[in-house]
Image: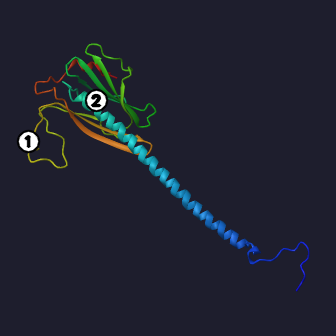
Amino acid sequence: MKPRRPGDRAQCPDDAGFSLVEVMVSMAIMGIMMVIFTGGILQIYRTTTATESINIAQSQLQLAFQRLDKEVRYASWIAEPGKVGATWYVEFTGPTSTECRQLRLATAPAGGGLGVLQLVKWTQGAPPSPSAPGQTIASEIVTTGVDPFDKQSVNETPYASPSPSPSAAVFTTDFQRLRIRLTTKVATGVAQIDTTFTALNTSRDTPATNACSEGRPTS
């Protein structure tokens, strides 16, 4: 038996250590696991962000619907919608013919396609200036090339329905109605609304014109 010299360490099978190949294989496996883990985290983040964007866009339209339903439902007259420059307009009255209202949808100044829907109010005979700010109803509106406002007059047939009733072909409305089509976009989230509001204070005797049309600019 060979005598041990001072400073010699006892040999043990576990003291052999790792080879370079084993270290490189371990690092490669760890790298693959990190890539998979990071990809999963990023996917969760993207999904969460997209969901939040859709929720914000839907909330914009939900608030707009509630406000418009309250305003248009009790209108006593609705104007023919129109566009002046890059801005869409439609005027209507409140419960009385002297309470003037105007919905104004202006696109982004830079032409980016995003706009703001505002509500302007005044008393008949004292119209606001074209630059007067209104109450913001919804923002981040996408201009899709479809007119956002469309009036349905008395005696007109309703808009087409996916599943019309047997009597739809002969039905005509006794009220003025306003169809509003809006699309909002927040980041990657997109939401749409296509709703027709019935002005319950209108009738077959409602005049076609009203002095509240004074609020729309001419150029």
Judge by depth and name the residue closer to the eye, 146 or 85: 146
Name the residue rendered at 57%, 60% in the picture.
35
Name the residue rendered at 27%, 18% in the picture.
214
Point out the image quarter for the N terminus: bottom right
Q: Position of residue 72 (x, y in %)?
A: 23, 29
Identity, as a three-letter code, of the amino acid under mark 1 = Val
Identity, as a three-letter code, of the amino acid under mark 2 = Gly
In this rendering, position of residue 7 left or right of residue 136: right
In this rendering, position of residue 111 left or right of residue 14: left
* Residue 143 visible, this orientation: no
> Which of the 4 quarters of the picture holds residue 64?
top left
Name the residue rendered at 25%, 29% in the picture.
70
Judge by depth and name the residue closer to the eye, 14 or 183: 14
In this rendering, position of residue 31 left or right of residue 8: left
Q: Nearer the viewer, mark 2 or mark 1?
A: 1
Query: Residue under circle 1?
Result: 170
In this rendering, position of residue 159 left or right of residue 22: left
The answer to whether residue 120 is above or below residue 198 is above
Point out the image quarter for the C terminus: top left
State the SS at label 1. loop
Q: Position of residue 153 (x, y in %)?
A: 16, 31
Query: Residue under circle 2?
Result: 82
Q: Earlier in the sequence, mark 2 or mark 1?
A: 2
Judge by depth and name the residue closer to the eye, 43 or 94: 43
The answer to whether residue 25 is above or below residue 140 is below
Is the residue marked by circle 2 packed among few (<14), some (14-19), or many (20+) residues within 10 Å? some
Judge by depth and name the residue closer to the eye, 90 or 8: 8
Q: Position of residue 18 (x, y in %)?
A: 73, 72
The answer to whether residue 105 is above or below residue 1 is above
